[in-house]
Every structure is written in C-alpha cells, then in structure tokens.
C-alpha cells in the first residue's frame, strides 16, 4: 500500500510539472501589455455639431475646418463630431436640441433666431448691407455684439458669425426682374417676421418649410420658388426644379455659431480658449472663401445647367429698394432704435452694388 501511495505521488508531481512547465502557461510575473492608445479616451471631450447644409457649402466646409482646428489646438483632447444635411436635427428643431443638451453646437441661419429674439430681424432687412464689407462691419461691430448679448437670456452662448452669401430668387414660372414679377407666386421661406414682411410687400404668398424639404416641395410644385445663396441652390440641386434665377443680392444669409451654455461652462479655461481661437480662424477662413465658393457655383450653374440667370440692372435695383421700403417701417417697431441707426449708418457708408 505504501509503494502504491509513493507511485501516485510521483504521478501527481509529474502532472503538475507538465502543467506549469511543459505547456508554457503564463505566470503571474509576466509583464502586463499596456495599450497607450487608450489613454485618456474616457476623458476626451466630444462636441456634437449639427447643421442642415451640405458639406460642399460654406457652412459645411467651415464646420470641417473648425473641427480640424479644434483637434489641433487642443492636442486632440476635444473632438468635434459633425452631423451635416440635417442628419440628426432639422432646422426647425435644432435650437431645442442645443438648449436641451442633445447636441453641443449648431450654426443656424441668423433668421432662425429672429422669432425668439426680435432684434435679430435687423440682419434680414432687404438691402440693409449692400456689400461684403458692410456685412463684415455688421457682424464684427455694434450690431453683432448687441445681438450676441440677447442670447444671454437662453441656454445658448454665441461664439460669432459665419458667412455664406447674398440671397437670390429662383422660380419655375417666369423671369423675375421687376418687383411686380413676384405677385401671385408661392415661395418657400425661412421663418422670421422680416422675411414675411419682405414677401408681403411683393404680394407673394409664402410657406415656411424646412430647408431639407424644399427640394421635394419644388419637385411636386407645391411652391413656385425660393430664395437662397448660390451655394445652397447648387448643392441642393434646386436648379433641377427651377427654370429661372435672379441675381438680386436682396439680403445676406449668414450663420450664428452657438454652443450649449452649460456645456461651455464645464469646459476648462484652456479648452474654452482653444475653441474660441479655432472659431476665430474659421470665421476668417469662411469670410474669404465663401465668396469664392459662391462664385464657383454660379460658374458651374452657367456651364452645366439650363437655368436662366438674370442680373438686375441699376434701374431695376432701385425699383426693388423702393418696393421694400415698407418693410423698414414695419420692422423698426420691434427692433431697438440703436440697431436701426447703425443699419442706416452702414448703408450710407457703403455704396449699393
């Protein structure tokens, strides 16, 4: 019996030796491999940036430029996720998404804010800012600063303004050269009291439709036309459903760059500074390149489409200015007098196109 026990002990010892030595199983003294690429990922700041424009428009390109600048200036501590073309929120609900914290940034057309903040109507006044320099002075000067102060009443913080271009008319009925050519037409518009007053002055009926639903409504002939920048007309292919475009430059379309206030306040001062600097660089970039983009797109329209493009003469332009004069009387009632004085000052300083 004793010999059997000894034999069994030797067999057990052999099995254990084979397990720990023969099969080369890892032992606790082996170094733990560290994946340094995972360092800090859980602490990385994510900015969800929602907008409704196409990626090849001034806003779409500016968003990408901004995202890259933020990554660089924060050493990749802050990442901007861009959702373009109304992928997650359309223009009618992106404000709520921002202020409720569902996204951290948006860049709506300035007109979208005029229904909440009456002073913002000033940016939609027809022929208020007749040149690109006049627009820049409005954004960078007293008007822009006062409008951004209005946002303190909300959960949105304004970082500044991005540029696109002057708005033009398109329609599928006939050329629009005189103000009376707009009568009895049905146009898609953005929301805003000034924009509605503009079309009312022309005896034009309107429907406020989401930007990304405009093409479909043109396609089914629910609307006859719309107003927009050349870059938006080109990128959204409105020209496929429109026969005529008028280079009227009757108002400027730009964007307010907004960030959720609570999110902003939680950022470190270093990150806030980096994002602010990235936005300043982006603003300078899109101010210059938006003109080039719109010019490039109008050349593309002339070269590759059948849409008829007419440009207002000086005489026609003066008739449009006169037709829009009632809009100023109506809007002045709800805009601060200091802003209206600044508009008139800028108009006097810059010649009409």
Image (tube, grey):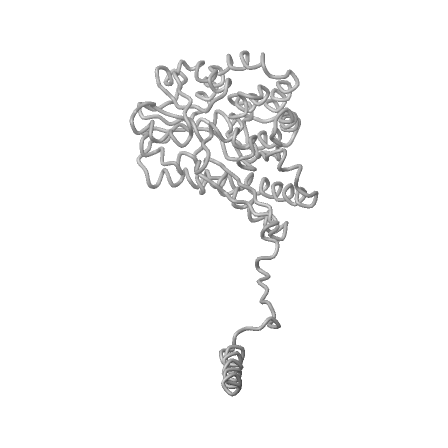
Considering depth in this image, is 341 or 17 the residue closer to the camera?
17
Q: Residue at x 55, y 24 (%)?
A: 123
Total marks in image: 0
Q: Quadrant of residue 337?
A: top right
The residue lying furthest to the bottom in this view is: 3
Q: Position of residue 323 (x, y in %)?
A: 46, 15
Q: Position of residue 301 (x, y in %)?
A: 37, 38
Considering depth in this image, is 326 or 318 the residue closer to the camera?
326
Residue 250 against residue 203 in the figure, above or below: below
Q: Quadrant of residue 26?
A: bottom right
Residue 293 against residue 256 in the figure, above or below: below
Q: Residue at x 31, y 26 (%)?
A: 172
The residue lying furthest to the right in this view is: 269
Q: Position of residue 296 (x, y in %)?
A: 44, 41
Residue 8 against residue 287 in the figure, above or below: below
The residue lying furthest to the front in this view is: 1
Q: Residue at x 34, y 28 (%)?
A: 244
Q: Quadrant of residue 217?
A: top left
Q: Residue at x 51, y 21 (%)?
A: 126
Q: Position of residue 312 (x, y in %)?
A: 43, 25
């Amino acid at each position: 019996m004793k010999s059997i026990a000894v034999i069994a002990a030797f067999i057990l010892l052999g099995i254990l030796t084979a397990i720990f030595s023969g099969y080369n199983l890892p032992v606790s003294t082996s170094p733990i491999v560290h994946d340094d690429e995972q360092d800090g990922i859980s602490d990385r700041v994510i900015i969800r940036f929602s907008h409704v424009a196409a990626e090849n428009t001034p806003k779409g390109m500016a968003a990408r430029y901004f995202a890259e600048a933020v990554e660089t200036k924060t050493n990749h501590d802050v990442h901007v996720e861009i959702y373009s073309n109304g992928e997650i929120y359309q223009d009618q609900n992106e404000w709520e998404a921002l202020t409720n914290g569902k996204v951290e940034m948006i860049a709506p057309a300035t007109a979208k804010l005029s229904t909440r903040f009456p002073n913002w109507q000033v940016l939609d006044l027809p022929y208020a800012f007749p040149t690109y320099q006049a627009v820049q002075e409005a954004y960078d000067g007293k008007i822009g600063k006062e409008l951004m102060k209005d946002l303190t009443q909300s959960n949105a913080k304004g970082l500044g303004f991005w540029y696109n271009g002057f708005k033009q008319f398109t329609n599928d009925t006939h050329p629009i050269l005189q103000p009376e050519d707009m009568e009895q037409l049905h146009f898609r518009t953005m929301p805003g009291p000034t924009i509605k007053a503009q079309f009312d002055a022309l005896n034009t009926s309107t429907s406020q439709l989401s930007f990304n639903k405009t093409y479909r409504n043109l396609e089914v002939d629910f609307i006859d036309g719309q107003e927009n920048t050349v870059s938006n007309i080109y990128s959204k292919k409105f020209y496929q459903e429109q026969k005529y475009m008028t280079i009227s430059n009757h108002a400027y379309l730009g964007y307010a760059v907004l960030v959720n206030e609570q999110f902003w306040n939680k950022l470190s001062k270093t990150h806030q500074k980096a994002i602010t600097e990235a936005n300043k660089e982006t603003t300078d970039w899109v101010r210059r390149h938006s003109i080039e983009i719109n010019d490039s797109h109008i050349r593309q329209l002339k070269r590759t489409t059948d849409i008829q493009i007419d440009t207002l003469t000086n005489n026609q332009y003066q008739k449009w200015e006169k037709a829009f004069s009632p809009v100023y009387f109506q809007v002045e009632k709800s805009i601060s007098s200091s802003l209206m004085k600044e508009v008139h000052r800028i108009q006097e300083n810059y010649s009409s196109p």
